[in-house]
Image: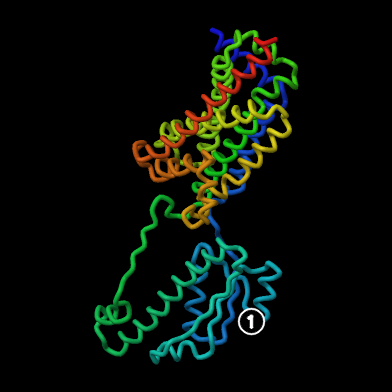
Amino acid sequence: MTVLQIAVREWKRISALPAFYVLLLIVPFFLFFFYAFIYEKEKVKNLPVAIWDEDHSAASRQLTFLLEQMESIHIIQPVNSQTELEHLILKGEIMGAVHFPTGMEIRILSGEPVNITLYTNASALVPAKLLFKNASEVIITGGAGITLQKLVQSGMNRSKAMALVQPLVLTTLPLYNPEYNYFQYLVPGLITVALQMIIIMVGVLIFNYESKTETKQELYAISKGSAFNILLGKTLAHLVVAWINFVLVTGIIFPLFGIDSHLATFHFFVLFTLLALACIGIGALISVIVDDTMLATDIALFYTAPAFVFSGYTFPRWAMPWYDQYYAMIMPYSSFLDGFVKVYTMRLPLQFALNEIGTLLLFILLTFPLATLLLRRKIRKEYIGS
């Protein structure tokens, strides 16, 4: 009964104090929609590309036509020099250019190697890689097709000519995100890392904000001086709010924007609940240790801000320096993300995320008992001792 009283009291504080309801209820709503609208187009399409054609042959025209058929490429204009195309890239008018050299078709038909150059703006890493992928696919396939046509016209059997032109056939089968859909890939990750930051940022105010609102003695009285009851009641209240945001994500944001998640919603819920508890535990521990709310908030911000960078979502953790890998390990989001990719993106059973679940439980089992112990000492000093 005491725990429930504290939980209801905390819900009332969350709904009444701007420091709580703005971060926990208002910010997530707008932030989730903001992330969703950023990547609404899902895939990068129609990147502006220029053609520098010095060959002016049937082969260069055919390759230009094939390039235009690629979903990510939109040829907007011809250029006549490297200086001109570099100028257009610097101005942001094109993302890349393809150069067909003089005598290209003649050299292809005579069996000589031809150097076709693809210029990309590598400062925009993802579009540059996408242009390289699509352009290289067209140029390799188109070049092989021209050679095949020449061999068939010379009287060679088509199957033999095909084996000669392409002795090795590579079949690529992208798994789990075959269309390179940014929406399916980035939005869930951005939303969950934002939730981690929000839960911890509010968590660091769970106890020390009682002093600022001059309600600490009231809390001690309701709990009968029990640190365990206080921590359990407040945790229950904040966990329910975290579940409300989970429903907002999986019940509104994902269906509204067409993110297919129903098959993995329960697994996602299990991992999210553990993440929320780990974040509440970390926030509560900081709140008990640091009395100054501004300093506690600064510590939480310093701790949570780099979570997405160190999580391995956009760059593998194993490729980071060893000290960055250790830093990533002390953030619950890193373990959550590993499990999330398995059960949500790859649709694997929950047992494949047992290691990640164990790590999140370790965060919980370390932070809550320690926070309870330190809070008990504070209560003895500030309430029972008085």
The quarter of the image holding the N terminus is: top right
Name the residue beneath numbered marker 1.
82
Q: How is the image coloured?
A: rainbow
The quarter of the image holding the C terminus is: top right
Question: Above or below — where is 235 with respect to 295?
Answer: above
> Foreground: 372 or 146?
372
Give percent across and percent down for residue 6: 60, 13
Secondary-structure class at tag 1: helix
Residue density around tag 1, few if under 14, some if 14–19, many if 20 or more, within 10 Å: few
Give percent across and percent down for residue 230: 58, 16
> Foreground: 238 or 161?
238
Three-letter code for the amino acid on which mark 1 is drawn: Gln
- Among the 4 quarters of the image, the one containing residue 249: top right
Q: How many marks on residues?
A: 1
Give percent across and percent down for residue 208: 69, 24
> Foreground: 361 or 64?
361
Residue at 67% across, 29% down: 290
